[in-house]
Image (cartoon, rainbow, N blue to C red):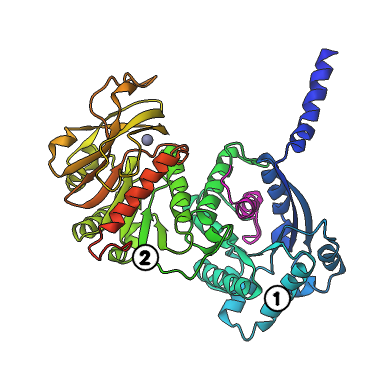
Amino acid sequence: MRRYVVFLLLALLPLTASAQMRDTLRVLCIGNSFTYVCEAHQKLVDLAASEGHHIVMNAQYVGGFTFGRHLQRDETLNAIERPGPQDAFDAVFLQNQSQLHARYATDPDRYAYVLADAKELSGRVRQYSPQARIYLESTWSYPASDSGGFGSLEAFDANSDRGTGLLAKACGARVSYIGKAFARARAAAPDIELLADDAKHQNDYGSYLKACVNYLLLYGERFDARAASCGLDPAKCARLRAVAEEVVLAGDSDAAFAARPANYAGKTVRFKALLYYATNVEEAHRQFALQAIDFFRKLTDGNGWELDVTQDLAESGDLSRYDLIIMPNAAPGSARERSLFEKYMEDGGGWLGFHAAGYNDRSTGWDWFRTFLGGVSFRCNNWPPQPALVQVEGHSHAINRNLPDRFVAPATEFYQWQPDLRSNPDVTVLASLAPENFPMGLKDIVYGGDWPLVWSNGRYRMVYINMGHGDACFSDATQNLLFINALRWVVSTSPKGDPFQ
Ligand code: ZN
């Protein structure tokens, strides 16, 4: 008997969970077979539910349909018009016939009807759901029919992105860069097939990736570790979620700004920074980098400065146009990138490096970098990551001026360096681990010694900050202030002049 009670309780669990949902969004999806095959809209509902968000979904799709044909379809129009003030849609995803946005980009005059239909459809939506966020989906490119008649996936992608961007702008809609996510996944996860046997439509993984992109647009927050895998291989799904996060939250596309709370455009851009990071690294270092991108990007609100993000210094063009390069989790690895970075720093460039970006040992094979850092290499670390008491070394330096004498840094992995950093007369140590921390660690125990955490090598315009392991590093206001101070100081020492004066 007791056993049945347990079964009954387990059966009730999903109901209990739905009662604890954080919020409810009413979502409308209008599309065709690129919407309904493998049910991306249902995966979106499931993904949201696993993150505590309830979606009331209304999906309208017919194979091969364009926006124009939906405008002549009673069911679609009824779905758009049904909302009363209480049940208007919060978000609407519009997915056109798969090649039309790309065609529009190649010949806007000939395909003027694509623009007219997109305006008409989004206008109808806005009439009945005035608050709704409207997303125009950029459909992925595919090999079938000679890449939809564009000759190559790249040409298809480029036109599709551009066409969707132009149409969205004209409609006052936002772009859902699903095409970009598919292109990124082709490069980052080539072993995960996203298309069905027809080399055109989405299979379950493609449909999952589409749902991930739209989830991130809706909620503007990263996935929880327990995000739904919708019955698919959890490891593959985790990689596809990471791709979607890169494109939507960390990408250089307009999509990264789609969920921003406010736009204070029109101010002067004071300086320009480049953030360089790697994803093929320890998970805790990847997490920190993604959070760093969010953190610094938020500081660009109001367009006071500009931040570009890259994973390849060699592809970033002329580095000298940047007042600062931020490296949250990696230093350059290839010979080409290393020589570009050396030249940039030797010519007066600025650097703000965190944690693993300063890591170097015998195997690194980059003497210049060791000298640049102040002449030190990694010696050892505490483990596991944990909070620690930090002592701020004096308040005369601009970075330390408004910091307290001591603060507790959120959990991170701390590095010790060798040989003695303080014996280098060019180095100014700005913060270190307080002696009260020792002995510190549960697995790898460290017993004391000098642990410089923040320093500058006066021969360069640089600051190194040891924090940067895991997802807690941006959770402390004092430490965030230190990060901002460091960024501000590096920029303020630019040979082009202090942009803050
Ligand atoms: Zn680490």
Q: Please tell me how crowded label 1 is: few (under 14), some (14-19), or many (20+) other residues with Cα within 10 Å.
A: some
The residue beneath circle 1 is: 119
The residue beneath circle 2 is: 270
**Residue 184 is a magenta residue:** no
In the figure, is residue 287 to the left or right of 123?
left
What type is the residue that disc 2 sits on?
A: Arg
Measured from the top left, where is residue 153 in percent x and y?
A: 53, 66
Measured from the top left, where is residue 31 in percent x and y?
A: 73, 64
Check whether the beta carbons of the residues at disc 1 and disc 2 lie within 8 A of each other. no
Residue nearest the viewer, comparing 310 with 272: 272
Location of the C terminus by quadrant is: bottom left
Task: Please determine whether, in this image, residue 395 is positioned above or below residue 339.
Answer: above
Task: Quote the CA–CA distance across marks 1 and 2.
Answer: 37 Å
Which stretch is magenta? 196-223
**Residue 210 is a magenta residue:** yes
What type is the residue that disc 1 sits on?
A: Lys
Q: For residue 304, which quarter of the picture?
A: bottom left
In the figure, is residue 243 to the left or right of 439?
right
Measured from the top left, where is residue 300 in percent x and y?
A: 45, 59
SS type, badge 2:
loop
